[in-house]
Image: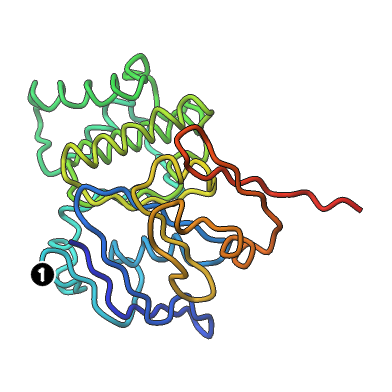
């Protein structure tokens, strides 16, 4: 279990989180939602050890400590929102960097096969020998996701992993996120902006706003008209899909 206890995060005079608490279990996919500036990306960076904080963060009874940051990050696969690859590498080479600790002058067949399977699973095997600098933003996003999975993480932190993807690839990637999380008993925490998409692909929703966690739970419990309207300052209509999950429809203000 990943535990955040009384976490406070500040940047200058700006309070991002004030004694926030979270309990995150293995084998579950959690999606963080909230308006711009609510601190979603900052929270992921805090868990990864990039942002100073007050309080306690523990994983399997190991505390997050700057003194032992490399040890803390070892089981974490982190995909930030803006991932830039500036070197002229092939897609396969970029994916292999996910296992930098296992790379030598000669890359073994087993690792190559594993990387090729990741690319095939995400539908981008045909890009394996393409220069990553020549790919579209969406294609690079899939490449970086493959790199993160090759690390075989126990904790998966994904900051807007589908922001540059079309509808087909959004669904494909999120299906793999959920399947990987359950099959490998991983703790997955991701950030999405599409509330309806989050409802489909999350075991639990975490709503951030007003310097704290406003709600955590199943989509149908958390994504209510009152909570969403208060956080996002919009009028909404909540529909139900064929599975009974909420579909959030923002309402246009007619004048």
87, above or below 211, in the image: above
Residue 112 falls in image quadrant? top left
Q: Is residue 13 left or right of residue 173?
A: right
Residue at point 53%, 60% (across, down): 34
Residue at point 40%, 28% (across, down): 132
Binning the other alpha carbons within 10 Å of mark 1 as few (below 14), some (14 to 19) or many (20 upward) gives: few
Residue 222 point in image, percent of width and height: 47, 59
Residue most extreme to the top: 126
91, above or below 196, in the image: above
Q: Is residue 135 left or right of residue 190?
A: right
Residue in the foreground of this view, choosing between 48 and 174: 174
Query: In this figure, which residue is indicated by the disc labeled 1?
Result: 61
The N terminus sits in image quarter: bottom left
Residue most extreme to the bottom: 13
124, above or below 50, in the image: above
Residue most extreme to the right: 255
Residue at point 26%, 49% (across, down): 28
**Disc 1 on helix, strand or loop?**
loop
Residue 46 point in image, percent of width and height: 34, 67
Report how many numbered discs are placed on residues in the image.
1
Q: Is residue 81 left or right of residue 178?
A: right
Residue in the foreground of this view, choosing between 118 and 22: 22
Residue 181 point in image, percent of width and height: 24, 42
Residue 133 point in image, percent of width and height: 45, 30
């Amino acid at each position: 279990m990943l535990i955040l206890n009384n976490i406070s995060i500040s940047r200058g005079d700006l309070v991002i989180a004030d004694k926030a608490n979270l309990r995150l279990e293995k084998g579950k996919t959690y999606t963080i939602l909230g308006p711009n500036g609510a601190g979603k990306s900052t929270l992921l960076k805090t868990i990864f050890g990039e942002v100073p904080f007050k309080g306690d963060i523990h994983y399997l009874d190991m505390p997050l400590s700057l003194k032992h940051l490399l040890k803390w990050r070892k089981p974490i696969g982190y995909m930030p929102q803006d991932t830039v690859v500036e070197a002229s590498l092939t897609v396969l080479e970029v994916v292999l960097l996910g296992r930098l600790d296992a790379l030598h002058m000669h890359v073994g067949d087993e690792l190559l096969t594993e990387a090729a399977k990741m690319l095939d699973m995400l539908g981008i095997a045909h890009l394996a020998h393409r220069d990553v600098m020549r790919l579209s933003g969406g294609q690079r996003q899939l490449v970086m996701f493959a790199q993160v999975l090759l690390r075989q993480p126990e904790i998966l932190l994904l900051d807007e992993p589908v922001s540059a993807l079309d509808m087909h690839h959004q669904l494909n990637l999120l299906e793999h996120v959920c399947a990987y999380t359950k099959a490998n008993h991983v703790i997955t925490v991701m950030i999405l902006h599409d509330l309806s998409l989050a409802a489909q692909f999350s075991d639990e929703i975490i709503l951030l706003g007003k310097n704290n966690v406003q709600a955590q739970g199943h989509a149908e419990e958390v994504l209510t008209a009152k909570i969403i309207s208060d956080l996002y300052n919009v009028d909404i209509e909540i529909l139900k899909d064929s599975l009974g999950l909420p579909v959030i429809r923002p309402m246009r203000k007619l004048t």
